[in-house]
Image: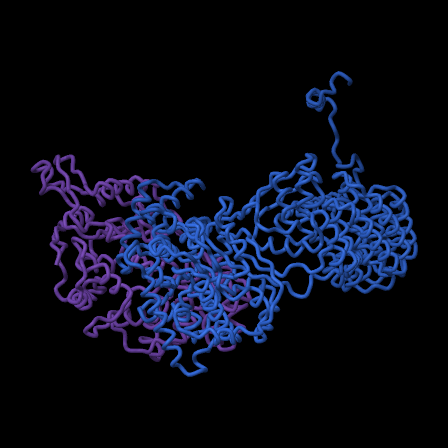
Chain colours: A blue, B purple
Amino acid sequence: MSHVEVYGIRHHGPGSARALRGALEEFKPDAVLIEGPPEADPIVELAGEPGMVPPVALLAYAPATGGAPAAAGAGDRGDGRKAAFWPFAEFSPEWQAIRYALGAGVPVRFCDLPAAHQLVPSPGAEEEDSEPEDAEQESAEKDGPGEGEAPPEPAEGIRLDPLGWLAKAAGYDDAERWWDDVVEHRGGGPSPFPAIAEAMAELREQLAELPEGAASAGLPPGHLLREEQREAHMRRTLRRTLKEGHERVAVVCGAWHVPALRAKVPAAHDDRTLRGLPKAKVAMTWVPWTHGRLSGRSGYGAGVRSPGWYHHLFTAPDRPVERWLTAAARVLRAEDLHVSSAHVIEAVRLAEALAALRGRPLAGLDEVTEATRAVLCEGADLPVELIQRRMVVGERLGAVPERTPMVPLQRDLQAQQRRLRLKPSALDKEQDLDLRKPVDLERSRLLHRLRLLHVDWGVPAETGRSKGTFRETWTLAWRPEFDVELIEASAWGTTVRGAATARAESAATGAGTLADLTSVAERCLLADLGDALPTVMRVLADRAAVDTDVAQLMSAMPALVRALRYGDVRGTPTGPLRTVVDGLVVRICVGLPPAVTGLDDDAAREFLGHVDAVHGALALLAEDGHIERWRRTLEGLVARPEALHGLIEGRLTRLLLDAGRLHDVADRMARAVSTGTAPARAAAWVEGFLSGGGLILMHDTALLRLVDDWIAGLPGDSFTDVLPLLRRTFGAYADAERRAIGERLRRLDQTSAASSGPDGEDVDAARAAAATATTLHILGWEGSS
Amino acid sequence: MTEKHLPGGLGGRPSGETSVLRPHAEQEYAGELARLAEHDDRPRPPGWRLSPWAVTTYLLGGELPDGTAVTPKYVGPRRLMEVAVATLATDRALLLLGVPGTAKTWVSEHLAAAVSGDSTLLVQGTAGTAEEAIRYGWNYARLLAEGPSEQALVESPLMRAMRLGSVARIEELTRMPSDVQDTLITVLSEKTLPVPELNTEVQARKGFTVIATANDRDRGVNELSSALRRRFNTVVLPLPESVEEEVGIVARRVDQIGAGLELPESPAGLEEIRRVVTVFRELRSGVTGDGRTKLKSPSGTLSTAEAISVITSGLALAAHFGDGVLRAADVAGGIVGAVVQDPVSDRVVWQEYLEAVVRDRPEWRDFYRACREVS
């Protein structure tokens, strides 16, 4: 006669996992049904491969409909991506059931509602689905009793948190802790499953007695209906399995569902429930997962708070507390914190005493953490946080075997990762790249390309763009959701390079402002996407041609020039880019004069930034023709000072002075700050003129005297008006500069009286001779002199 | 009652407990301790008067089966007290660490009272604490007359605690010179105190342990050597987390102290307490309660204990010189005294706070005026 055992488990519960493994070995089923999407049936056998290392997750996603990358080139990312995960850790009971069944050669099936139905939004859950976090919607877990951090509402229903209910009945305030004490920390003993099933049956019975409104209080809309459908599907799968002739069937599902599966429900009823459900096209695969994503910390609602601890509980053969604290001591020692074995011994004793004091059967994570804090870390919090990060959560990254179904893009990335010896890891890792080395250059390109695909595996560290163009520092950390991004990006192409090219082209076409566009161009160059460049450049040229806003053109300029210079370092061909830059310079020079006239204070200040940026960019470009054109434009502007804002005029005068193009600066300044000019304008002029460094004042005595005379000659009222502006200018100087200027001013009169050398110092040649000789000797100029 | 061997006949309890200024914890809460012991049916570690559960209840408060209410002695995270009690139960030494005024001494006294029924075996750590204060000294008259003998030996509180198997307390451990601190190492690891002069030793009886307090903020402290540190389990006592919690602590203590000092009954205005606590918290954290304004912090620690003393002295002022109701003017002097420890820099801090924060709070106008008057 057929025999069905239903095992109610807690998702990601190591105690459940261990008990389940034991129960299965005893029961010896000839078929195992597991709560999970049935679409995964064909790939479940992959779980037995040696290359499969948990934590991993089943990923259900809507496959790309287009196929060719060109078809998806429309630019948007499709209307709302749909994906769902079913994560498994080593200590997940489901995982243990799968491994057992594969090891025993017994068929495994998933019996939950197909992902095809789950990925279709239920009508009530519309707004929930539009959230960006939807990709992590944990349909498989939503109602599992594994939810430690159930929703925050105080009036949460039994249904959402059945364990919380039971824990409360047992006098615990924390469901996880209760479950830990009652199930997870049990070593051996009789199977807990009958008791769990009974408790759940009792709960469901009580729930059924509650009035309609109270029973569903606090539930997301559509939850009840979905639960009914899921349980109906589980029953249907069970029936089908029995019909196929399996005699001993084990069902592994969330504890909550046990009574529903045991209930005798006519098949017709379930068929009615499941009839006419909307369906989506779904593809299924395994993806690596991380412990960090299993934990509740990262906003993954149905997680466990301490996957690392659970993993330890499951894998440690005996003495979990001792082993854990020893491991913690090793982590601390690795960070050069002195922790001896005596510490560990005392920590174990404290943990056990605490457990006894709190009436717990075995020291749990709380006790162990307290002991770690009080003994190993000597009361300090920082090392405790380290342990929390490294061990309690534990950044473990799973792996999937070769044969796992993957989109070509993922395969391409894997091949490149292997070739470039860049291994994905869940922990943050710094990687220094020397772009003069071919391998590092390729790594950098790969990371840049991935960033174009929104796979931020590497994040460049801010090292300042101007210096060290051949060195890049990246922080690498692999996150499981990158697989989803990759799968989604596979619509753009089959290789990383191809997809990134298509993505860049589309981004260029859809770019909003010229500055966005230039940043795309810059990224293309960094990623060495030569194929995308023509398109990007064409769009860029078109856009620059029609863009009438000179400010926009000017803000686009620095990034382009940087790209041009940087491209040279990386050996990227930049011909087309140069054409664009050339055109841009001409347009800016033509458009500048009308644009700078009649600006108010704020606009002038903003514009000043653009002028400086372009000036700096042109200096970086170091092309004489452009610089000449730019200077001539500026000269033209300065020639008609009345139309300019004081700030701009001052700044332009200064730029030209630095370039050695103006020889009457003293006159100009005197004119600008003379009594005929409104004090506010004069001060703005001075601010513009002196902004960005007081060096000129320190070295140009004539100029300094000019400024000094002007300030000294101001009438009392005007001085008060001008003072804030002056203060703003001089306040921006470094302390040392200010002091030097002050000292110079003090000596100004003496200097004019003595008018000896620049510093007013006489050199005694005879006394200096000895020092000079030594200096020359050091410099090695001795022979030539 | 513990037997006393104090030289010079200073030992022994005063006969009428009401006449002492501040009774010991085990005297003040003798009733509670007796009740707890009565209902305590759990196993007691050797040498303990109560079981660890009962000690925890004594510290954190609770209700006994017969309806006796146990007042909470410590308000704060339960886990800290559990760790402390568990530490003592594993015969480890306990180090209570924290900034001044976080109830370290208070907790240590009550722990000792609950565990061994005696909180008086106390060594006060100062820069001048000598080794004799921790080990033993000699009665020199006897030493000269009779030579080294048991009778000439003057035991330290620590030695007596070892003999009796009870808890010894060391206050301000970090204020002792380092070499004196290190005398503790042997005691804590070997649980024995050799007396080479008599060729004997005192071996600790079960139940002996040490509770030390130290603060990690004060200047002029001697860091613990790592060898000594290793022999302690450390519990860091935090400052109260929220205003409400701190107001509660202050109000409760003020009531107790007021009753002890037999001040004329006067309702300790909760409003005034809240104001003092708010001022202290804001200056301590360097930001106003609404998180909008940054403030300079004064050099003092502005602990909860200081808030308590400000309120208590304010109450005394109100009772004796005022109209019996605690008013802003009564606490203003105390607050200024607590905040302005350094006459130059702290005065600036206080003036800034007064003008920038206090002045802009309409409901604090009386307080502002009172503070202006005293500063």
Q: Pick out the residue farthest to the top.
A: A783
Vertical arrangement, residue A212 with respect to residue A115, above or below: below
Vertical arrangement, residue A163 with respect to residue A339, above or below: below
In the image shown, does A604 or A671 lie closer to the viewer?
A604
The quarter of the picture where residue A116 lies is bottom right
Residue A574's spot in the image, x, y percent? 81, 43
Q: Is residue B134 left or right of residue A105?
A: left
Residue B175's spot in the image, x, y percent? 33, 47
Q: Is residue B332 visible?
A: no
In the image shown, does A340 or A455 lie closer to the viewer?
A455
Q: Residue at x 18, y 43 (%)?
A: B136
Vertical arrangement, residue A571 with respect to residue B171, above or below: above
Q: Is residue A517 left or right of residue A103?
A: right
Q: Residue at x 35, y 45 (%)?
A: A323
Vertical arrangement, residue A615 with respect to residue A261, above or below: above
Q: Is residue A574 left or right of residue A114?
A: right
Residue A286's spot in the image, x, y percent? 55, 53
Residue B107's spot in the image, x, y percent? 29, 59
In the image shown, does B160 or A578 lie closer to the viewer?
A578
Q: Residue at x 28, y 78 (%)?
A: B265
Q: Is residue A468 visible?
A: yes
Q: Pick out the residue farthest to the left.
A: B146
In the rendered image, the quadrant that contains the N terminus of chain B is bottom left
